[in-house]
């Protein structure tokens, strides 16, 4: 069985091409940024922590010149990304092995989601890994699920992929695809 993050990568890989524009809204340790860089023509990666940028730059090395690492909040994605977006990925929560008081917050996450969805092309995809077993995580989970579940079904398909028999707040994946007008 695929883990949620593996499923997120598979979901995005299906539509990524060397001409794609992709956003890593929460670069963290750089695993998703590297995944996108190996498939997309342009990648914008955001994080508010210097430590995340340093880890991601080290992971990328020098070969991925199409990646722009941005030391800013994902809530400002529209300030940096002007072109249509093909794919985006979020990992909500905190940076592992770092200050656990620095977390994604519902207000900034919802602002980023709104901005990305406005720029998402027909057939474009968005994945959100929801980690909520920390202080503030449950509120963010609930607000993100409420927002995504209310996207109009004629414009977006929204699915979740999650373990049902696990304890300790297991992370889960929400996948969004923007539909072409007239799609079912």
Image: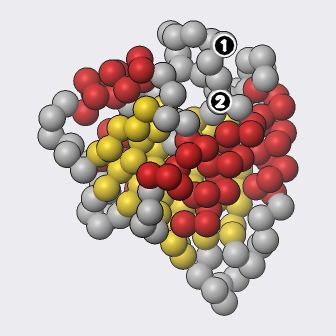
Q: Residue furthest bottom?
A: 182
Instruction: Say which residue label 2 marks.
Output: 104
| Figure quadrant of the C terminus | bottom right
Residue 169 visible somewhere in the drawing: no
Whether residue 54 is situated above or below residue 130 in the rendered picture: above
Residue lying furthest left in this view?
63
Against 157, residue 3 (above or below) is: above
User: Disc 2 on helix, strand or loop?
Assistant: loop
* Coordinates of residue 96 in the picture (x, y in percent): 52, 16
Q: Residues within 10 Å of mark 1 (few under 14, many from 20)?
A: few
Asked if marks 1 and 2 touch (Cβ < 8 Å), the reply is no
Q: Is residue 41 above or below residue 28?
A: below
In percent of width and height, residue 141 lies at 78, 36
For numbered disc 1, what is the local secondary structure? loop
The residue located at (50%, 52%) in the rendering is 79
Q: Is residue 56 left or right of residue 65?
A: right
Q: CA distance from mark 1 to mark 2?
A: 10 Å
x and y percent of residue 68 in the render?
32, 44
**Outermost residue, front side:** 79
Residue at 70 percent of width and 75 percent of height: 155
Classify residue 62 as left or right of residue 163.
left
- The residue shown at (59%, 82%) is 180
Residue depicted at 52% across the width and 11% down the height: 98
Q: Depth check: give the residue in front, 29 or 171.
A: 29
Relative depth, front residue between 25 and 82:
82
Q: Give the image location of residue 139, x and y in percent.
A: 83, 31
The quarter of the picture where residue 29 lies is top left
Left or right of 9 on screen, residue 105: right
Q: Is residue 136 above or below residue 31?
A: above
Q: In the rendered image, which quarter contains the N terminus? A: top right
Say which residue label 1 marks.
101
């Amino acid at each position: 069985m695929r883990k949620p993050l593996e499923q997120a990568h598979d979901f995005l890989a299906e539509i990524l091409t060397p001409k794609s524009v992709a956003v890593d809204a929460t670069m963290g340790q750089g695993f998703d940024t590297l995944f996108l860089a190996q498939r997309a023509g342009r990648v914008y990666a955001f994080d508010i922590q210097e430590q995340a940028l340093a880890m991601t730059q080290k992971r990328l090395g020098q070969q991925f010149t199409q990646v722009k690492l941005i030391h800013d909040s994902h809530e400002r994605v529209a300030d940096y990304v002007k072109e249509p977006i093909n794919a985006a990925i979020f990992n909500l929560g905190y940076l592992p092995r770092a200050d656990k008081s620095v977390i994604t917050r519902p207000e900034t996450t919802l602002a980023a989601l709104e901005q990305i969805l406005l720029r998402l092309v027909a057939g474009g995809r968005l994945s959100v890994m929801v980690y909520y077993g920390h202080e503030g995580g449950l509120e963010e989970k609930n607000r993100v699920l409420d927002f995504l579940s209310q996207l109009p079904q004629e414009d977006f398909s929204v699915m979740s992929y999650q373990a049902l028999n696990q304890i300790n707040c297991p992370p889960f994946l929400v996948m969004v695809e923007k539909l072409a007008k007239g799609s079912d």
